[in-house]
Image (tube, rainbow, N blue to C red):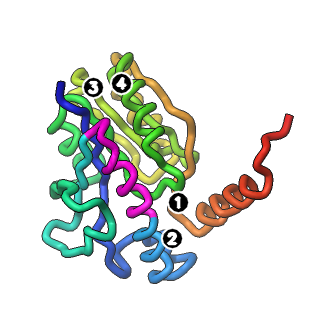
Amino acid sequence: MRRPVVIIFARVPRLGAVKRRLAAGIGARGALRFYRAMLSATAWPIARDRRWHTVLAITPVGARADWARLAPPGTPRMPQIAGDLGQRMEKALARYPRAILIGSDIPGLRPADIAAGFRALGRADAVFGPALDGGYWLVGFGPRRPHKPFADVRWSSRHALADTLTNFRRHRVVLLPHKRDVDSAEDLAATCLRMFSRRNHPYPGP
């Protein structure tokens, strides 16, 4: 039996070209450092896990990067097609009968989250990881999926997940726990505060 596939959407790390909303709050160099660190922290543990096959979907096509630092050596790469986010995700997922797609701006995203997504696909047609801003940090499809899974989605808005789910009204869907993605300086501050709180309060309250 072929292993399922994890697709990591990645933008080539270049100054001024990544995390522009975050850069507005912490500067372009800070945003670039954050993006490099997040991409590496996401790609290394997930790509080294042999329960699935991992592919990096890269944009822009032809741009160079030090991938040996950002992902395990030998991790396959493929170009993202031109188009909006929905078109790019649809094309990437269409290559595989059972696949999960993630980005690289979710602090704490680990192989256990991917494994939970594939378990969900064992009983559903699609799985989504809702983000606190109304989008989603993970999307996964089995063989049965809508013809246009991302039609009429208002990207970068609080309606993104709700719009997508409208296309899945005739399909079985599982939602994973919410996570916070980091798009702005406020998101980053909230994430750092949560991590600090956990570190200083290791035992949950009653």
Which residue in the protein does label 1 denote? 182
Of 164 and 74, the residue lying toward us: 74
Q: Is residue 83 visible?
A: yes
In the rendered view of the protein, which quadrant contains the C terminus?
A: top right
Residue placed under numbered mark 3 in the picture: 142
Q: Label 2 near label 1: C-beta < 8 Å?
A: yes
Amino acid on which the number 2 mark rests in the picture: Leu
Q: Residue at horizontal 37%, vertical 80%? A: 16
In terms of sequence position, does the residue under pointer 1 or pointer 4 come before the other?
4
Residue annotated with mark 2: 22
Q: Secondary structure at mark 1?
A: loop
Reading the chain from its start, which is encountered first: label 3 or label 1? Answer: 3
User: Real-space Cα distance between discs 1 and 2?
Assistant: 8 Å
Give the alpha-carbon distance from disc 2 to disc 3, as whole Å.
33 Å
Callout 4–callout 3 Cβ contact below 8 Å? yes
Count of numbered circles in the view: 4
